[in-house]
Image (tube, helix red, strand yellow):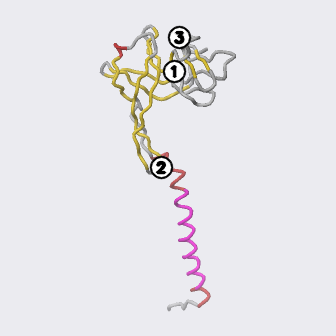
Amino acid sequence: MSQRVTRRQFLNYSLMGVGSFMAAGIVLPMGRFALDPVFKSGSAGGMITTSVKISELKEEPTKVDFKFEQKDAWYTSEVTAFAWVYKDGDNVVALSPTCKHLGCTVNWNGDKENPNQFFCPCHNGRYEKNGKNIPGTPPLAPLDQYETGEKGGMLTIGKKHPNELAK
């Protein structure tokens, strides 16, 4: 015995089906957006090998360029950045060149009146060699520090983190 579907039931089933597809079209992209970072594979260490040999580093900070791939939404580009790198005994120190006041680029020995310091020309900000901000100058925090390492005798630079030397 087959049961007949009334017009009211048919419209109810049709509207429920269309409504379900529309709801899925809205909810699924939001779910994908929220869960996407969980399913992405992490980088293998995240260390970038530079063209500078560890043995060539000195006690005076030198500018070391490095390149990395930056992904911005669907666009991937190669970015060139640099760090101020020097040897402190057996340790290698890499400091960010970005001033903590307004984000200008700091230079080593950039101020002739105050040698052996990092100098920000934007507002006369100064930092000690270890990146500590000098009291009475605009920067309110020390320069950030990069992780450093060695691979085949070459300097590797990793993620930026708050300065651990300027305490």
Residue 146 or residue 41, whichever sits in front: 146
- Residue 49's place in the image compared with 131, above or below, is below
Q: Residues within 10 Å of mark 1 (few under 14, many from 20)?
A: many
Tell me the quarter of the image containing the C terminus.
Answer: top right
Determine if the magenta segment contains residue 69: no
Residue assigned mark 2: 73
- In the rendered image, residue 160, in percent from the top left (x then y), is placed at 51, 28
Quadrant for residue 71, please give it.
Answer: top left
Q: Residue at x 58, y 11 (%)?
A: 114
- In the rendered image, residue 7, in percent from the top left (x then y), is placed at 59, 90
Residue assigned mark 1: 107
Residue assigned mark 3: 116
Q: Earlier in the sequence, mark 3 or mark 2?
A: 2
Quadrant for residue 143, please give it.
Answer: top right
Q: Earlier in the sequence, mark 3 or mark 1?
A: 1
**SS class of the residue under badge 1?**
strand
Q: What kind of residue is marked 3?
A: Asn
Query: Furthest residue to the front?
Result: 112
Q: Residue at x 45, y 11 (%)?
A: 60
In front: mark 2 or mark 1?
1
What secondary structure is the magenta-colored segment mainly?
helix
Residue 117 or residue 3, whichever sits in front: 117
Magenta stretch in the rendered image: 11-30
- In the rendered image, residue 122, in percent from the top left (x then y), is placed at 60, 27
Determine if the magenta segment contains residue 16: yes
Q: Residue at x 52, y 59 (%)?
A: 29
Separation of residues labelled 3 and 2 (CA atoms): 41 Å
- Residue 73's place in the image compared with 15, above or below, is above
Q: 141 left or right of 35?
A: right
Q: Earlier in the sequence, mark 2 or mark 1?
A: 2
